[in-house]
Amino acid sequence: MIKIGDISLGNFPLLLAPMEDVSDPPFRALCKKYGADMMYTEFISSEGLIRDAVKSVQKLDIFEYERPVGIQIFGYDIDSMKEATEITQSANPDIIDINYGCPVKKVACKGAGAGILQDIPKMVKMTAEIVKSTHLPVTVKTRLGWDENSKYIVEVAERLQDVGIEAISIHGRTRKQMYKGEADWSLIADVKKNPRMHIPVFGNGDIDSPEKAVEYKNKFGVDGIMIGRASIGYPWIFNEIKHFAKTGLHLEKPGVAERVDAAIQHLEMSVKWKGEILGVAEMKRHYTNYFKGIYDFKQTRMKLVTSYDLDEIMDTLNYIKENSDKYSFA
């Protein structure tokens, strides 16, 4: 049984990765419904929280149905991160997660996210101060290192454990790689094999099928897997991995009608949480993935991604469902 603090996550948990503008409450609800064991919010700026910025504060919204859930924060200033931790704690998450992995230039070049991988002593000090600032379990998401010459993750993971983190998720690339090339899980395995490590070690990067998830579980010995991009528009991947790991067989892929039902649920929750204008606009990135692989679907997809009229979009989705037997997968 894998545990983070007192939170039991099963024998091989599947975690939803924190993804900006993706891992919001509507999306998390779908991932929970289809098998995710642990959810993380979008990353939230510590500076935004302490300045009471509307967008940052809204990201603190969590709901009982999605527990266990962690709120992820990022920042470059230790005092700001401590203050943000106290604000985050008041939202009553199950876990506070620190983002030491975001490779995006506007974040990393300020020394936040993966940028802190250039200053390991500061990374360790910041983590220690955050752990002291909360009664909640603290976890970390990070990368192998800044670049090929600084892949110190085995040492870093141990040092972070020594100052009190209770789990670590590692993306198998450096900051310099961004999302290019193939994720290298060999160093993640080395972290797990370190005899001094006793906290859960989760692997992340390039898991896009049940076969790969089971292969990497067996090959690299991680305690669980964090899934990001492969879940966008396809939350079914969590249950598919679990079923394949248990039986060696594939679950039947969701048909067109089931995909429409998921898209409608996602859209309705998005509008309810964000308001109609923003809720409709931010759903557009999901439609391509929900209906990926359907033959001769381009015109219908264009209706979904170009319309800003909620009723028109709902009419299109209902039309797809009512005529689902006319669609086939390429």
Image: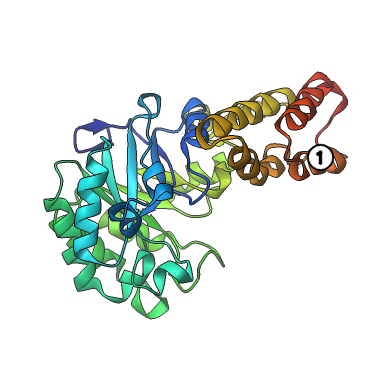
**In the rendered image, is residue 199 in sight?**
no
Tell me: residue 48, above or below residue 103. Answer: above
Residue denoted by label 1: 303
> Farthest top residue?
322
Task: Please tell me which residue is depicted at 32% across the width and 41% down the height of the picture.
Answer: 70
**Count the marks: how many?**
1
Seen in the image, is 329 located left or right of residue 36? right
Task: Please tell me which residue is depicted at 24% across the width and 32% down the height of the picture.
Answer: 7
* Quadrant of the rendering where the N terminus is positioned: top left
**Residue in front for this viewpoint, 63 or 187:** 63
Seen in the image, is 176 located left or right of residue 2? right
Image quadrant where residue 36 sits: top left
> Farthest bottom residue?
149
Q: Which amino acid type is marked by label 1?
A: Lys
Q: From the top left corner, tell me how far across and down residue 137 is, in percent.
A: 20, 43
Q: From the top left corner, tell me how far across and down residue 128 is, in percent.
A: 15, 59
Tell me: residue 113, above or below residue 109. Answer: above
